[in-house]
Image (tube, coloured by chain):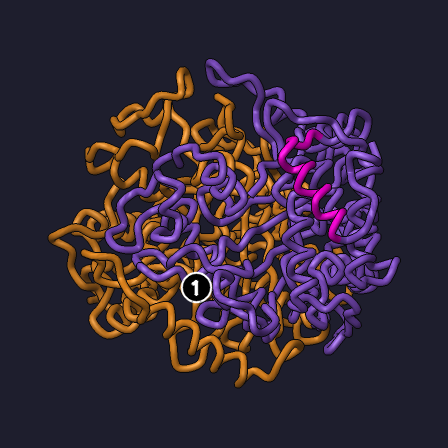
Chain colours: A orange, B purple
Amino acid sequence: MAAFADDNARRIPAAAILNIMTDAFRACGLPDADAKIVAGAMLDADLSGADAHGIFRLAGYVKQLKAGNFNPRAEIKVLERSPATALVDGDNGMGHLVMTHAANLAVELARASGVGWVGVRRSNHSGAGSTYAAIPLEQGMVGIYSAVSSSNFMAPWGGAEPLLGTNPIAVAIPAGKEAPVVLDIATSVASNGLIRTYASQGRPLPEGWVISREDGRPITDGKRLDEGMFVPVGEYKGSGLAIVLGLLGGPLNRAAFGRDVKDTTAPQERESNTGHLMIALDPTKFLPLDMFKSEMDRHIHDLASSKKLPGVDEIRIPGQGREARRADRQKNGVPLAPGLIKQVDDLAKTLNITPLSARS
Amino acid sequence: MAAFADDNARRIPAAAILNIMTDAFRACGLPDADAKIVAGAMLDADLSGADAHGIFRLAGYVKQLKAGNFNPRAEIKVLERSPATALVDGDNGMGHLVMTHAANLAVELARASGVGWVGVRRSNHSGAGSTYAAIPLEQGMVGIYSAVSSSNFMAPWGGAEPLLGTNPIAVAIPAGKEAPVVLDIATSVASNGLIRTYASQGRPLPEGWVISREDGRPITDGKRLDEGMFVPVGEYKGSGLAIVLGLLGGPLNRAAFGRDVKDTTAPQERESNTGHLMIALDPTKFLPLDMFKSEMDRHIHDLASSKKLPGVDEIRIPGQGREARRADRQKNGVPLAPGLIKQVDDLAKTLNITPLSARS
């Protein structure tokens, strides 16, 4: 598995990344408009710094499409609808497409009813949750995203069987002059992407990330990941969050959870039936948007400028680094490791599209 | 500060606890119906095992009422309303009253629109979040509660100033034959109640609960709490959750957050303007309730009966212990420490009501 960026990373223009991903998905049979949406959602991750969810994933997604595990010509349907809720069937399409649809629908419901809660079934891995939580921001709305991960890596607290995903939650709240607050966290101590990156680079895993299924002892050797389970953040608290998010993203939407989540290491014989949930909330139903934004600015400024502990450079406010990173990468390109560029170029050859190196 | 239960705890009948609390609030000027609602919400905490939010708090609340910090005859108003949202003004009444109102309103909105999101301002400390998250359960609905704590004990990650509450989140999801899933967690490693209990009992605080504001080093001496800050669960993740929950419970509702939260150790010259949020979701807008409940049962059973790590008695599924505790305490009484019983009896004397000892 290639790493996304390392010391030898090259800066690749955002447009080149967007274009090769669009071409790749087109080559896999996605309609033009859909290929653009998926590539755009992945580029959003690359720009924001959610590197594990950007072009890094392209080869994996193409493999799934070629294997027939994702439906390239998905027809997304709304199965159920009430004034403020909807249930979306993703027709086993790419998660990025399904979740972009769901986020826009949540905004539409929220505009009419104040809040919109959209459940999603028959979707797939959709990349970074912040991409979708941030969609309502453009309309001055709050966005909340969660999902049942398409693989189980955590056990319920006390357990020895990985029956839970690292089910993430992402929350985006608009601000005025300050960057919006955008939180995007897995319910494990370390995300799957981070753990796999350490393992692929042969770096020892910090204690507290992965424990043995046999005896609960720490596993620090990345080669032994198969014997391990990821540790939930805050022990029973992260496990509890993964359970409630999973139940609301899964069974409520007739999507997979627990024992229904298939083992991704086994041959994939059927669709993942990945479940998600997406909420949009219209702040103007509570107070004028200008007032909300200026209050957000005041509080963000108060937190960011408050006294730091010795040795701390910056107080961590979710989403504030994200904004600066986007501006930098939009202007100077996205740093990609040579190994990743080569992987994408090799993939381009098999798909008969222009390689990344020739685009930048 | 009295501990709620210890080795010498006596079992006091639930009815006696409910009645003395009702009488106490009546004696402080609450109308009969309101006194009953507040006492009922507090008893719910005592029964569920959220002991830090039950009769343990009675003396503190009475003190606030007597000092004029809570409005005993609050007229709760709905300031804003849309098909699926509402903003409630608690008129500085007791949080239990305001949140019971808000939870019922959320259910009403969800019945019509699928989901209801109720923001709350000008409320006060409302006890255990699970009490309100569980209200929609009775209607077969999902409940989600959060709040901006009325005191700041945590810093944003990297910071040295406590500008964040231990803003909790509670989620309740109905099941069929199994107990409902009820999660109720603070965004700090240890809750305020737990930390104060250790401190009051002179027990050393486990490392990782409280750190020094000066240098970030662990504080384990409960007498030094004033020099410390609580540690967020999962470091920047808990801090991030406390920030987003706080912003959605506070500024969105024109309620206190950050620097606006007054120091509870200072003389209270004005109301707390505590903010909360309450969401109810109607599963029948997604699938038939029977199907949802039986799927919940299947998944709860799968998790609870899965393989345990060596030395583990029981896999921790949120809310499953709660149900058994309620049944036991309803039948056999709530265990209360002699010191707490004495504190309540002394209070009863000052209020001219029958003491607890004489009721059981």
What stretch of residues is rendered in magenta? B335-350
Residue in the image at 57% along x and 28% along y: B316
Secondary structure at numbered mark 1: strand
**Magenta span: helix, strand or loop, mainly?**
helix
| Residue A355 falls left or right of residue B149 | left
Q: Amino acid at mark 1?
A: Val
Percent of width and height locating residue A298 = 42, 78
- Inspect this view and state whether residue B288 appears: no
The foreground one among A7 and B251 is B251
Residue B338 lies in the magenta stretch? yes
Q: Is residue B94 above or below residue A238?
A: below
Q: Quadrant of residue A142?
A: bottom right
Percent of width and height locating residue B52 = 61, 42
Residue in the image at 45% along x and 32% along y: A153
Residue in the image at 21% along x and 32% along y: A204
- Inspect this view and state whether residue A342 appears: yes
Percent of width and height locating residue A160 = 48, 21
